[in-house]
Image (cartoon, helix red, strand yellow):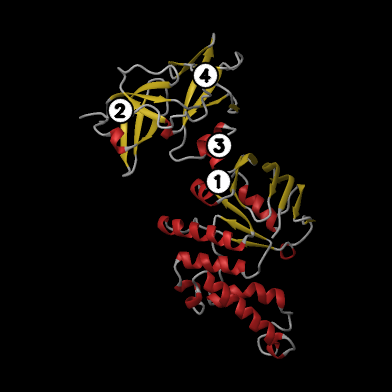
Amino acid sequence: MASVSIQGLRKSFGTTPVLRGVSLDIRDGEFLTLVGPSGCGKTTLLRILAGLDHADEGVLFIGDTPVDHLPPKRRDVAMVFQSYALYPYMSVRQNMALPLLMRRLSRLQRMPLMGRWLPGTRATLSDIDSTVAETAESLGLGSLLERRPAQLSGGQRQRVALGRAMVRQPSVFLMDEPLSNLDAKLRVSTRAEIAQLHRRLGTTFVYVTHDQVEAMTMSDRVAMMMDGEILQLASPQELYDDPNDLRVAEFIGTPKANTLPATLSHDVLRVANEVWPLHGLAKRETQLRIAVRPEWWSLGSTSERTSPAEGWIDGDVSHIELLGSETLVHVQSRGVDAVMVARVTPEAARGLMPGQRLRLRTRRALVFDAQGLRIRGVRWAGGRVCDVAPADAKGPAPAVFSA
């Protein structure tokens, strides 16, 4: 096991900057995920860690050893690729054994005929075979060792790729979107397998994905990347509850956070043409953005009085998604270009119809300035901080609409 330290990493392809001074410390034995949209630089960062690409600037340590000048085979890392990269003409056993053969046997010992008669070859081959068999059993591949990749399912191929990395017992595992080629059902089970594998091995994992669900469910910490920079490094729950940047708030969470335009004039805050009772904003902050998670909304009638410690918008129901355990209600407001989405219980949405007029209310919100940076310490009129869950987490009883 080993920690990883990245300091001031920069990389450009031609005149296009891909990494803009990235610094990151990954703890020994940690599962850290790099998440972000396509083109944000996360795969480039992983390839630099592996030694497959070289940075223009910056320093890279694995443990206490600087590895910038070391070739991939001397970095003690193992990489699992998006495309599996299995040799189609080799069996599962041969694919998994290949890294050990290349590492432990000399060129003469790898010769097809005479190699196995050289001193020490048979003992090394026996040890390699035992290691491969043990690793295959731990991954549920023990009965598939003689099959070739074409005879395996996508999930089995992915496990072979993981096994080929595991047999080396590296200090750091690097994974580049290893689940992107799997169907939705298989992704769920393989996510659990990788998380269990990490707990069993206790090795440092650096995982790259654009899928926020993978990042949130598997990681100890998540580094949110965009435009070649790390916007925030935090635990999955902190990233969701306490984003530093509006781009983080919008990227993390499904459905994404609802964002509303806001203006501050003469100490009056208007959000989507409604006055919200928020205080503590600097007068210089005239243009703001308010973010509300879908589950923070509750539904009410436009005829109901609102609490002095909540914000609201009025709108018309444009669409209803019934998802079994929850319902997503899409609301179009005249003061907001984007459609607002509220996540509520099926009981709360019972009787709702498209075109119906209602009021969305919230007792929790995230406030960002014109540049998208978080503003903390803003309070409702009642004195409670607006970005902290209320003591009564359930809030007001949701309205039930009758047909």
Task: Give whichever of discs 2 and 4 has the lower sequence position.
Answer: 4
Instruction: Determine whether, in the image, residue 292 is placed left or right of residue 328.
Output: right
Task: Give whichever of discs 4 and 1 has the lower sequence position.
Answer: 1
Could you say which disc has been placed on residue 38 in the image?
1
Instruction: Give the image location of residue 42, x and y in percent.
Output: 62, 48
Amino acid residing under circle 2: Ala
Gap in angstroms between the C-alphas marked 2 and 4: 26 Å
In this view, the residue farthest toward the left is 403
Q: Residue at x 39, y 21 (%)?
A: 313
| Front tag of 2 and 1 | 2
Q: Quadrant of residue 346?
A: top left
Could you say which disc has been placed on residue 248 in the image?
3
Could you say which disc has been placed on residue 383 in the image?
4
In contact (CB < 8 Å): disc 2 and disc 1: no
Gap in angstroms between the C-alphas marked 3 and 1: 15 Å
Task: Give whichever of discs 2 and 3 has the lower sequence position.
Answer: 3
10 Å crowding of disc 2: few (<14), some (14-19), many (20+): some
Instruction: Give the image location of residue 366, x and y in percent.
Output: 52, 28
In this view, the residue farthest toward the front is 391
Instruction: Give the image location of residue 113, x and y in percent.
Output: 66, 89
Q: Residue at x 24, y 32 (%)?
A: 351
Quarter of the image where the C terminus is located: top left
Mark 2 lies on residue: 399
Is residue 340 placed above or below 125 in the rendered structure? above
Gap in angstroms between the C-alphas marked 4 and 1: 41 Å
Amino acid residing under circle 1: Ser
| Front tag of 3 and 1 | 3
The answer, for residue 90, to whether it is visible in the render is no
